[in-house]
Image (tube, coloured by chain):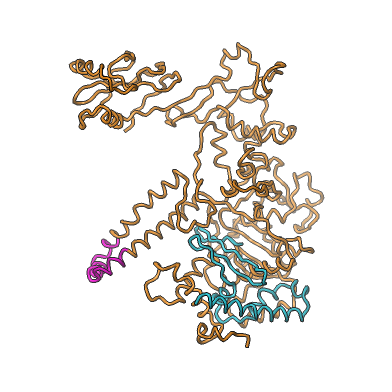
Amino acid sequence: MMRCARPDQSTCTITLHYLSNGTLRLRVSIRKQEMMIPLCIILKALQPGISDRVVYAQIIGDSGGAINALGAPQVERACLRFHTRFQNVISSFVRHAA
Amino acid sequence: MLRDHAMAPYFEENDHSSKSAISILGSMFLNFFFGYFPEGTDNATVGQFFIRRFIAVHVDDFLSKHDVLVLMARKLCCFARNECCEDNIDSLGYQELLLPGHLLSAFVTEKLGESLTQAASHVQREARIDFDDIASKLRYEPLAYCGKTIGRYSGIICDKVSSLLASGNLVSSSGLDLQQTTGFAIVAERLNKWRYFSHFRSVHRGQFFTTMKTTAVRKLLPEAWGFLCPVHTPDGGPCGLLSHLTARAHIICSRSNTIHAHSRLLDIIVSLGMAPNHTSSCGIDCTFLVLSRQRICDSTLNICLDGVLLGSAPCLVCAKISDALRRLKANSAFRLGLDPTLEIAFIDQGPTNSSPFPGLYLFSQAARCVRPVIQCGTESKIELIGPFEQMTLQIACNFRGLKSGVGDTSLSGASAETHAEIDPSNMLSVLASLTPFSDFNQSPRNMYQCQMGKQTMGTPAHAMIHRCDSKMYRILTPQAPLVCTHDYTTSNFNLYAQGTNSVVAVISYTGYDMEDAMIINKSAYQRGFGHGVVYKNIIVDLDLEADRRRDQSQSEPADFLLFGSPPPISTQKSDQNAGDPHRDSSYHVDSSPATSYIGEDGLPEIGQKICHGDSLWCAFYELSCKKVIGVHKDAETAYVDAVRFIG
């Protein structure tokens, strides 16, 4: 959860949720309505041309502890899992939006 | 080949272009921002608007927002993998305060935005009816037309603000990111100085928590040490939710760091060894650089300022940066243009999964609590620390209590205390530090004293004669306490004396509860022990009185009331009305209550004793010369202290 304050100290809280299926969703409240948006979509919207691999590396691989804890093959598997999940999320979201 | 072909129409040219992701976002939220955009706006614009408006609003550019979200995700994944502990949101270290000014400014901003939207849709509506007329108005007299349209919708903003101040009810379309909609205003009661004073030091956790059945939020947490008083909280309903700031803690009301100070700080941190955040500057190439750097050095930690990712540095470098910054902050903050209230919290990589997410976190914004402590180095300096920072420091209870740290130049040593309290009583609020021998009491007695002190009849103000509060209490024979604390004298509470020194006697066998009983010497009572007065303000508005009487007796509508006795010719007329059976009981028309002490001007003499039912003022109608007398409606006998003309 992060309560973000603008320079005039008006705030907007965003909450990041870790779903039990392993995906990340960002909860935003817009006019008292709560929206759960897949984090991947927002990250992709924020940074032009970023690849899945880089997003994955930034989130999971960047912290040294993770690499130590998971072995290299496990990282690969997690990476693959992340990709498929990402796909699912995107496609389901797109269908939903359509 | 991982891509789903079903998505192809949505990702037209390039699969992972940010434009398409933005368009998806935009199409999702188009309905929410219907009034904000002209018809035919493409989805990407709406998506950008959404991101600017709702996602990580504390930073402007998208790349920094990206970094912030990635950092959040990393922390969350770290927690999900059970590598760091959960942040306790009830702890003061993770909280800021909502200041009244910030609430008001957010409220006014929202209302201004709303009225502008309304005005814009008004113009659109009009344009749909007669386009040429509006177009010509906008072209030839834009100021007059826009002024008129906006003025139509903006006039109510003042009413809304005053209604918020009067009732404390927040009427808002967005909710302003707050958890409650009522209770934003409390009356600063001026029963005595203590009560009035503590209103301005109080912090409420939020109305939402008062309804909670669990008591976790009310718990006194060690993080609040030195910032919120453990003693000064009411017992009963709001216990632990309504607390008070300690005597030395204060809140930073305005953001003190300028852009200059910000860049100066960044320079210092970079010169101390932080690797700036390259991902945000040059895109994909540098991410590989960062990746390769990660492989070389596993344990880099993030450095954040006000929730913005500045860069990263290895663990040891982070510790050095925090030490150096801390020294600079205490020694030469003003010379370097640094923020002297900068909060520096370095969280080392913990050995277990019960330690918080590591990193170096800096805070410089408003709405934080800070308090002064002594920084023990080669020379002792006063340093302002924040609650989150406090969680990472070792603070001795007093200067003598330092184990070995005094001559020690290392500030990061985990075992020795690096800081010391200026005074052990700094953990107490102003009122709690007024209780003498509080360390010899059982703890709830001290809490009760904080409450009872605020209920005592005392000296609320000195300019009683010039004040017109509706009700005020004042003790006539207060005494300075025989025993008082150091803080009592330094904070000059003797100027607003309350209470009388008394010897509490043991009560009789069949007496009442000991707390509520006291044996009073008769002559002490006669000398004025416990004597007090209540000041009441009675406002007589003759226009209102005339209105009320008009409803009752249907006298001529244009007749005005004037203070004073009517001219003698008209007394006959008044005598006739005296027998009117429909007259109001509180308005006797030239009847029984004595008016002898009411002067020629229709007002009572100062010092006059007035009992229930006595006449208080006298007036007459300008045209009919009918006499009207207002009576004292209170049951209590009163003395006239002052008479004042208003308006």
Residue B332 image point, x, y percent: 63, 56
Res B203 quadrant in image: top right
Res B611 quadrant in image: top left
Residue B224 image point, x, y percent: 67, 48
The foreground one among B377 and A34 is A34
The foreground one among B588 and B518 is B588
Residue B571 image point, x, y percent: 21, 16
- The answer to whether residue B87 is seen in the rendering is yes
Residue B408 image point, x, y percent: 79, 55
Chain A takes which shade in the image?
cyan
Q: B304 above or below B383?
A: below
Start-end of magenta stretch:
B122-146
How many marks overall? 0
Q: Furthest-bottom residue in view? A: B1
Report the quarter where the C terminus of chain B lies.
top left
Res B595 quadrant in image: top left
The foreground one among A69 and B11 is B11
Q: Which lettered chain is shown in orange?
A: B
- Residue drawn at x 45%, y 75% is B45
- B126 within the magenta span: yes
